[in-house]
Image (cartoon, helix red, strand yellow):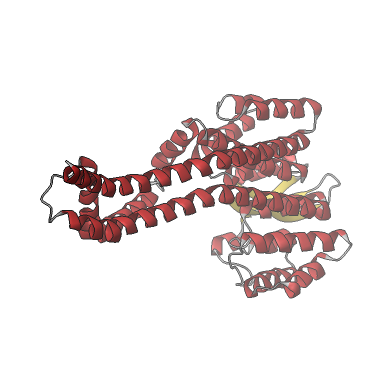
Amino acid sequence: MAVFDYQALGADGKKTSGVITADSPRAARRELRMRQLSPLNVSESRKAKSGGSVTGHDQKLGGGDLVVATRQLALLVKAGTPVEEAIGSVATEAEKPATRKVFMGVRSSITDGYSVSEALNGAPKAFPQFYRAVVSSGQASGRLDEVLERLATHLEKTRKMKNKILSALIYPIVLSVIALVVVTLLMIFVVPAIVEQFDTLGQDLPWLTDAVIAISVFLRNWGIITLILIIAGIWGLRRLFKVPRIAEARDRFILSLPIVGKLSRGVSSAAFARTFATLSASGAPVPECLGAAQGAMANTVFRKATQAVRRRVEEGASLARAMRAEEVFPPMLLHMIASGERGGDLAGMMERAADYLEEEFDNATTVALGLLEPLMIVFLAGIVALIVLSIMLPILQINTLAIG
């Protein structure tokens, strides 16, 4: 989506100006009319054309830094502090230099006469598109304090969701790496030192022992090359998955998996509902909410589906009917959206749906990790047991021959 400067007449006949995000100038005019504004002039933002910030202090902020700063800003504005002064206070209290520079740059832009949304648009690396769209909607509706508080809550819940996903993945990854390192060390250093004692006996070794010796020899001779090839393969796959068609096929395959697919569907649906609810409650029209929700999801199948939903909504279809046609969203979410449309509380129902989906994901990952831990321990113990058995079999064979 592009950024446009606009001048328009309000319902009271007063002239107003600001910034709006849309796919095209025509879409920007349509969204202005939905906000009860009569557009006079819509042109691409001069800051967007230059590609830089107004102040030059456009640095990427960490998720945690942006969450803390937004919460502080929301509290100060709600307490009646002027926006310029509140942003300056956030910049002063920031611990990291990058955060201080960004917010001091925003404050400087506001001092120079730019609106809050224009100042934020001057730092696209620091403030995501969704963030700027929410603030712009809040400024247009005159409820910036409420919108900032809602935005801070949204960022906190989104970060909490990401931390849940990370905690769900980090344990099996760490355990797998430890298991791989232990088995590799056994195969490279321990197995050869013990098995070479059998070479002097001239006896035929069991097939399990021969297999372990072959793997050990391969790792000793080709281990470094194999590791390089694995790293190169991972790098190549990451590049390959940047191709839209390949990425969509990957995400569609993930969604088709029994357990992982359900978890992935829940995560994407929760991100969709949470983002839509936050922007909708800020007064943004449905197409703009869908555009922001599309950017909040990592799954390309869901992003493509959301784009199609937005197109249908702009053509006049209801949101629930447009989403149902895509067949990727959970039935529970569709029912709640339909209820929200009938009752006139779409943002509230989206918020409840997001809470439910996030709680469901949390419960599912807790159960999955509870099952995964013993399974991985048993698998690791089985690999080590096979290695020990491959060493013990020749010894038992020699003892049997000696007794016989």
User: Relative to 363, does residue 56 appear above or below in the rendering?
Assistant: below
Residue 202 spot, x, y in % from top left? 10, 50
Would residue 83 be seen by someone viewing this image from the given angle? yes
Residue 15 spot, x, y in % from top left? 79, 53
Quick one: 143 or 34, which is closer to the camera? 143
Quick one: 264 or 149, which is closer to the camera? 264
Question: Residue shown at 53%/51% (left/top)?
Answer: 171
Question: Residue shown at 86%/58% (left/top)?
Answer: 78
Residue 142 spot, x, y in % from top left? 83, 52
User: Relative to 348, does residue 64 appear above or below in the rendering?
Assistant: below
Would residue 318 be seen by someone viewing this image from the given angle? no
Residue positioned most to the left = 202
Residue 184 position by quadrant = bottom left
Question: Residue shown at 76%/45% (left/top)?
Answer: 37
Residue 34 spot, x, y in % from top left? 73, 39
Quadrant location of the C terminus?
A: top left
In this rendering, the count of numbered labels is 0
347 sits left or right of 275 in the view? right
User: Relative to 278, does residue 83 appear above or below in the rendering?
Assistant: below
Residue positioned most to the right = 80
